[in-house]
Image (cartoon, rainbow, N blue to C red):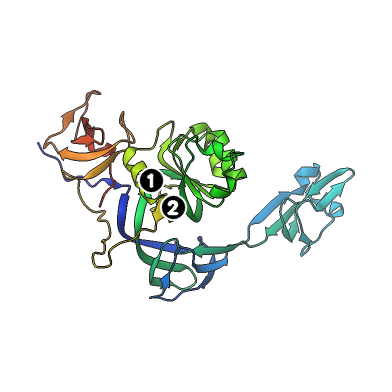
Amino acid sequence: MTFEPYFPDHRHLLGITMVRRARMLPNAATGDVEVARGARVTQTDTVVQGAAPAPFKLIDAARFFDVRPDKVEPLLRVGEGSSIEVGDILAQRGRRRLLAPIDGTVIAVSRGQIVLQGIAEMVAIQAGLNGTVIDVQVGRGVMIEGYGGVVQGVWGNNRQVIGGLRLEPSDGIESIQGGGLEADYRGALVVTRRTLRPLSLEVARDQEIVGIIAPSIAPSLRRAAEASPVAILLVEGFGTMRMSVPVMQFLETVAGRTASLDAATPGALESRRPELIVSVPFDPNDRPVLPNINLTLRPGAQVRLARGDSAGSMGVIVNLPKTPILMDNGLRVPCAQVELATGEKITAPLANLEVTGA
């Protein structure tokens, strides 16, 4: 028995490749595209800017004061159309005061409830890579084509930043604080081969590091990472995994270059990958092409073990058995024989593999 060709997930580690990326305003936001089709852009150029929809906040004043809805009006200190700031008194009963949780405007007061509208947030989207604008969506954004090195990870905390890429000090990110290194790392994207700890996050915030590329972080720190103002890209995922040798070797070769970190948070219907795009030189007479994401697994393909005992390891497929293999759990599944970067050869289910090359 043989099985059908297998189309794996792709999580790229490419030293140089053609890159096409959409740079769009958030959903429901509209604005102005600042560049024309065919324009050359650099990483830091603003390509579109606009206003995100102003958020609304519904406050149940009747419940707050434990009164009937028709008893709220006499307690109000604001009316429809009133401008408010955080901490302003919306209503008061004796010493008990209902304070505004946001800056904005009182939109309506009805049936004991107060409706507030916040201030629209201005959004500016940078190109994130050196290249050419190949498509424009009026009021929404652009598609940019360029060239660079790409490292895609597993998770990000939904931040986007641009900065110079720097390797952490030999004693880790924590040693940046009070070690006379603060100025060298301020505004930088810092690469660490270590699992992030609470102190790592604190130092990165306090020393104004704009981004971190790390192998992993404890699951218990996920909320802290999500709340951090620092963009965080996890290459391996949640746990205590260290950075794989191929990823670390690539990052060491591009240290000092300017990079764009898109720490996207993966979603069920989200095609964006958390990734780092590095500006690297290339031969204009030998331009790289787009990665082919429709390739089936084949011998010679560079892969990453996404699951199983060897999760996070990278290697090359050396053989694809024609029939399913009996695994330790008693299941027969399609497998590949993979030679890891260490030289060890293992048999891994195809479902555990991600392609890292083109």
Q: Nearer the viewer, residue 345 or 27?
A: 345
Residue occupying the point 71% across, 56% down: 115
- Dividing the picture into quadrants, the one containing residue 246 is top left
Give SS at disc 2.
loop
Answer left or right for 70 relative to 254.
right
Answer left or right for 325 relative to 45.
left
Give SS at disc 1.
helix
Q: Amino acid at mark 1?
A: Glu
Give above or below for 231 relative to 306: below
Percent position of residue 312, x then y: 34, 36
- Dividing the picture into quadrants, the one containing residue 51 is bottom right
Q: Amino acid at mark 2?
A: Gly
Q: Which residue is mark 2?
A: 256
Q: Which residue ends up furthest to the front in the rendered image?
A: 180
Mark 1, Cα crowd under 10 Å, few <14 / some 14-19 / many 20+, is some
Answer left or right for 213 relative to 182.
left
Percent position of residue 339, x then y: 20, 35
